[in-house]
Image: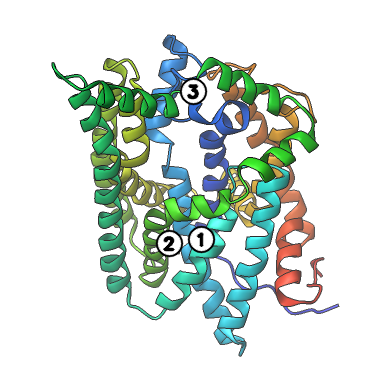
Amino acid sequence: MSTTPPSPRYLELDALRGFAVMGILLMNIVGFSMPEMAYVSPAVYGGTDLPDTIVWALSYVFVDGKMRGLFTILFGASMMLVIERAQKNGEDPAKVHFSRMTWLAIFGLVHFFLLWAGDILFLYAAVGCIAYFLRNLTANDLIRRALLIFTLGFLGYTVMFGSLLYMQYQAGLPGASAAAIENVAEIVAGFDSSAATITGDIALHQSGFVAIFLDKIQNDLFGPFVLLTYNLAETLPLMMIGMALYRNGFITGQWTVEAYRSWAIRLTVIGTAIVTAIAIYLIAGGFEILRMVNASYAWNWPSQMLMTIGYAALLIWLIRTFRNASWVVRIAAVGRAAFSNYLGTSLLMTFLFYGWGLGLYGSVGRAELYLFVLAAWVLMLIWSQPWLIRFRYGPLEWLWRSLARQRAQPMRLS
């Protein structure tokens, strides 16, 4: 067995990844347990009574998109770290990187078709292949180009989804043609799932494994590629920002505590103010479906970008301040095993909610779902640290690394 010591680790990067993989479950829990459009609007499914509305609002303002954004930034930073270490070890960085991305894409496709349609691994693998060719840009160039791509994507989606609101406005004017009114009604019906559609979705997910798998093959065969097409203009800039924040030392804790605190307060406050105003507008409008679609797919982009970076600064500030605390060490262990925890969470949640397991899909209220999140967090914190005291990698991290390097990696710590 090799006695080569593991590469040095950055506590900030590991703990940030731990926060992100735990936080992303706050965002995904609705997707595991309810029809897809319930994520966009509580009025579609999940309820709009006071507790459920409060839970939706807290999630929309503080969680939705931000945890995925943080995960994406960390992926870009980790990609740079792997490339840098490959170069230092005399390896071909392109071979190391593209081998990792190929196997990550395979893991993502398996995850999508056999477990959960909300997979992001295939998306990251594909975008990671593009991001590799930007690795030699300076931090400032990466940020400038990322913001340009992000702005173009935001404007494009704002115009695209905003046009639906304009069509709705035109159809509501006196003298609107029957064709215009019918066209808008069809658009609304496409987003606002009917009772029959919701009933069918619940029946499907409460059925067996084979039925769910065959439905994906028949009706969502190109789902991973659709997700890639839609998310490219958001995911690539965030990944590039992660690469830049690795280059300038932000993500590895090399800035001053005062700088992290300053950026955390400014970006988080501004982003929160923007998205809170949107949430109030949506609630006041009775969760009208086309407003909800615009808010979920376009209007939230600026606040998500600001809050994602603000959260990163805030969390690094906390990690730096409490770096010797046991809870920081445990969360860092969760981050070191983030791949195992991410896929393990999908396995656990689909078992709880899908028909091949306990079949709770569609039967748990939105507010009550977060008890399942809390339980999953406890499991992550319980197993990750003891495992990593004995082993170099999480189980799926070891498998991914071994497949990418085409040989079994040393697992046990000497």
Sequence-wise first label, 2 or 1: 1
The amino acid type, in three-letter code, at marker 1 is Phe
Residue 220: x %, y % from top left:
61, 44
Side of 356 relative to 344 (left or right): right
Quarter of the image with the N terminus in it: bottom right
State whether residue 345 appears in this view: no
Furthest toward the bottom, the residue is: 90
Residue located at (71% from left, 42% from top) = 115
Provide the secondary structure element on which disc 1 rests.
helix
Quarter of the image with the C terminus in it: bottom right
Residue 239: x %, y % from top left:
43, 61
**Closest to the observer, 92 or 154:** 154
Furthest toward the front, the residue is: 178
Residue beneath disc 3: 193
Sequence-wise first label, 2 or 3: 3
**Closest to the observer, 257 or 179:** 179
The amino acid type, in three-letter code, at marker 2 is Met
Side of 197 relative to 316 (left or right): right
Numbered mark located on residue 239 in the image: 2
Provide the secondary structure element on which disc 3 rests.
loop
Residue beneath disc 1: 75
Residue 101: x %, y % from top left:
60, 68
Side of 293 relative to 4 (left or right): left
Provide the secondary structure element on which disc 2 rests.
helix
**Closest to the observer, 181 or 9:** 181
C-alpha span from label 2 to label 1: 7 Å
